[in-house]
Amino acid sequence: MLGAVTAPAHPTDPLPRRIAHLDMDAFFASVELLRYPQLKGLPVVIGGGRRREDDVLARLREAYPERDWSDGDLSRIPLEFFPRLSGYTGRGVITTATYPARQFGVGSAMGLMKAAKLCPQAILLPVDFDEVRRISRLFKSTILEIAPVMEDRGVDEVYIDFTHVPGGQREGGRVLARLIQKSIFQATGITCSIGVAPNKLIAKMASEFNKPNGISIVWPDDLQEKIWPLPCRKVNGVGPKADEKLQGYGIHTIGELAARDPGWLIETFGKSYGAWLHAVSWGRDDRPVVTESEPVSMSRETTFERDLHAVRDRAELGAVFTRLCEQVADDLQRKGYAGKTIGIKLRYDNFQSVTRDVTIDHFTADAATIRRQAGLCLKRVDLTRRIRLLGVRVGKLVKPGTEGEQASGYSESHSTRTARDKASDEHTDLLFPELD
Ligand code: DCP
Ligand code: MG
């Protein structure tokens, strides 16, 4: 069975648990600033597409054809050659923004056109996923050289068990946190923020307290002062719908949640979720830091520049569809996986989404097979309406030579889901079917 490996237990442990959550600052934007250090301190937003070649360099070559501009000149490209948000038209959204840009009220998930109104002078750059992945691996390997018990939580965040690491208890973890911050900066040139607390729940909240380039240390006694004033939404696991329901009962902060009778919470939010809400509001969480996991599915998806129609835009849609299948096949092959369940996701112009999948009788990582099966899935959905987004997923993965595990749900953007993600999804589905 694929899945998690937990940190070794220390049954007679005299040391208090100290768990860190580390999150890179303005990650995708910081990655671009490594390439273009002249943008430091300026409002920069990332969004609007994927980087193919260096567009800024291309403009420069056009303007000065007589000169031999190369990648080495990137840091010398004058500011006027960088694209600005002003005049942006399109449907792109902000993936992330530098801290100077955030001062203008722009941030993740905001439409670029809206952001252009708030901060027209901001520089707009696309994401370089390859470089993001490279830096992601680099900062994680830097941590592992210092602290071996690390849980990978995605491209720019991890949990680290400080309890038994030298320096991990000094000043509540501040000494080790400083060392890790410094080492990551030396290795990557990017800052991060770290929260150290008695558990993952509090550490995750604490890493946001002093962003960017901050460290915050939370002790068990700090619950009332530092955690209770926060809105419930800051709890990792309280989504927008649960929050709305809480607000409906006049519960806005974690402290207000802690003041409620646990019996009432269980009655109102269900046995499992109600009990969990009570526990987290009192800062209780004993989940271990989990050091490994295996993917259960891989997927790719794309949102179109304009909504496409299955008949009128058949050629374009077909080409994108084939490309997505090839990308998923490539992801599988590169990572050495094969899958048995092939699925599609569609989002219509009214934002309604549908998924269909099929399980075949053998494991595959072959683009043509994926394309064929995904094509059959596509026949099972309404194709008379305009389509905004198209995705392809392969689940029930095995790494040839190992046992497989069933996949569930559907992933966001292009991503790899792990057994851990799956477990948390199931938790969510189980606990509040009518909520998040
Ligand atoms: N990201 C994304 N889609 C989202 C949110 C984030 O693609 N809906 C990407 C862009 C971010 C990266 O993931 O750079 C990390 O997400 P964070 O939420 O940690 O945001 P940042 O690292 O950009 O900023 P912060 O300094 O607040 O952590
Ligand atoms: Mg971050």
Image: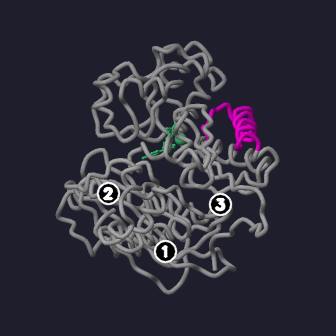
Q: Which residues are magenta?
A: 170-194
Q: Which residue is mark 3?
A: 289
Closest to the camera, between mark 2 and mark 1, is: 1
Q: Is mark 1 within 8 Å of ligand 1?
A: no
Looking at the image, which residue is at 60% across and 38% down? Answer: 216
Residue most extreme to the right: 166
Q: Is 278 left, or right, of 335 in this rendering?
A: left
Q: Mark 1 = which residue?
A: 407
Quarter of the image with the C terminus is bottom left
- Residue 317 got which mark? 2
Q: Are marks 2 and 1 in contact (CB under 8 Å)?
A: no
Crowd tier of the residue under label 3, counting other residues whose Cα lies within 10 Å: few below 14, some 14–19, many 20 or above: many
Q: Residues within 10 Å of mark 2 (few under 14, many from 20)?
A: some
The amino acid marked with disc number 1 is: Ala
Where on the picture, by quarter, is residue 413? bottom left
Relative vertical location of residue 36 with respect to residue 252 in this rendering, above or below: above
In front of the other: label 1 or label 3?
A: 3
Assign a secondary structure to mark 3. loop
Q: Is residue 211 visible?
A: yes
Whether residue 52 is visible:
no
Q: Which of 423/112 is in front?
A: 423
Q: Return the x and y of residue 128 as percentages of the image width and height.
A: 54, 40
